[in-house]
Image: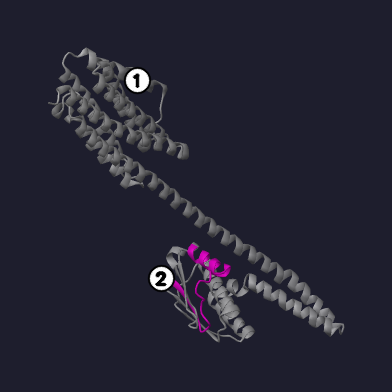
Amino acid sequence: MISFQSVTFDRTFVECSVLGFQSVLTSALAITCYVLWRRQRHDYFLTWSAAWFLYVLRLSAMSAFLVRRNMFWLFVHQVMTGLSAILLLAAAWQLSRGFTWRPWHLAAVPLMIGWAWLTIFGVPSMLVAGVTSTILLASVTIWTGVVFWHDRRRASSGAIKVLTWAFVLWGIHHLDYPLLRGFGAAVLYGAFVDVLFLFAIGLGMLFLVLGDERARLAARTVELEQLTRLLLRAQEDERRRIARELHDEAGQALTAVKIELDLDGHTDAGARVGRALAQVRDLSNLLRPSALDDLGLAAALRALADDVTERSRLQVDLAITGTNVLPPETEVVIYRVMQEALTNTVRHARATWVHAHLEIGRDAVLTVEDDGQGLSPGVSPNLGWLGMQERVTAAGGTLSITGHGGAGVRLRASIPVEAAS
């Protein structure tokens, strides 16, 4: 026959094993929160780490009580229970309301020790002690969930909701201690349910970290987009300044020299100066076309198409529809995209014609097609393509480039006019 002592020992061993597993899980939570605190320096992670560490001590004290049946360990269990619950509540306050620790908050330690001593050694009825402890623990745990609920409008709302329900349901679960279990009884049931809630809380913390990282990444992306726009604007301003200097200073000086040489009969030298003057004007126009500032986008695009046709003998047909006024930044983006598209076509496409169409409506849509050799599979885009992509994206638009071998290339850039404004 199996003795009563053997059954009790087996039950205690199983219960302690379950509590040990719960301790391992809780220790992992404590270590994870500490690592996150070292990485992000959010105070609530450090408070969470301390809370879970005390919770591990609570589980160890319960295991010691089950083995030794010594009330001292039950007293330690009560102290660790209260302190860990308070720290979990404090972490929720830190996360949602920016709570900061003050020296007088340490008074919670002697208060918790006094409360635990009163409930374990001062109250003659174990039922009264258990109910008192349970109500305190459940109230603080549910309170923690309510604090998270008030913070549900955070960017990581999914994580906040998980933490809210996990703490609220965990607090309700604490109420079954005096109802379903005597002291030390049904530990397996309690530990199993506690493990489920620990998993849920750990999952909520993971969602919280991922949400914060996602928000930080989004903010960083916005900053990079703003920086890109500023850099592109500064680049255009610098191009405009250099183009003006070349046109007004160098161009005028070369023109004067050419006139003097022609008047003195030095026609060969005058011709060479004339070629240099033409190169200066071409460079000035390449940096910043004067037509874009003086006559507008339509005239600048037509001048660009005519210039490419004249220089490369590539037939460029341009059509412009719509009469909406575009912001200056959008005009620059469209001009630069078409300029780069035509440059790539001349250099690489081996095309005979190009059709370009600019449609200005709610969006400014530029389409450039050619009959060249298309894009080679697996070939990475060059810096020109990347520059176009950067400009269009910074303006809030989209850019697509399609084409296969022998089928030509089709470029389409779409920029929202209202967003650009």
User: Residue 257: horizontal and vertical position, in percent?
Assistant: 81, 76
Q: Would you say residue 118 sits in the magenta stretch?
A: no
Residues shaded magenta:
364-393
- Amino acid type assigned to the residue bearing label 2 in the image: Arg
Residue depicted at x 18% and y 28%: 177
Residue depicted at x 44% and y 37%: 35
For residue 88, which quarter of the picture?
top left
In the rendered image, which residue does mark 2 sit on?
362
User: Residue 64: horizontal and vertical position, in percent?
Assistant: 28, 22
Work out whether residue 124 or residue 415 is closer to the camera in this orientation and state it: 124
Left or right of 63? Residue 280 is right
Q: Secondary structure at mark 2?
A: loop
The tag earlier along the polypeptide, 2 or 1, is 1
Residue 154, compared with residue 312, is above or below; it is: above
User: Residue 260: horizontal and vertical position, in percent?
Assistant: 84, 79
Residue depicted at x 64% and y 83%: 311
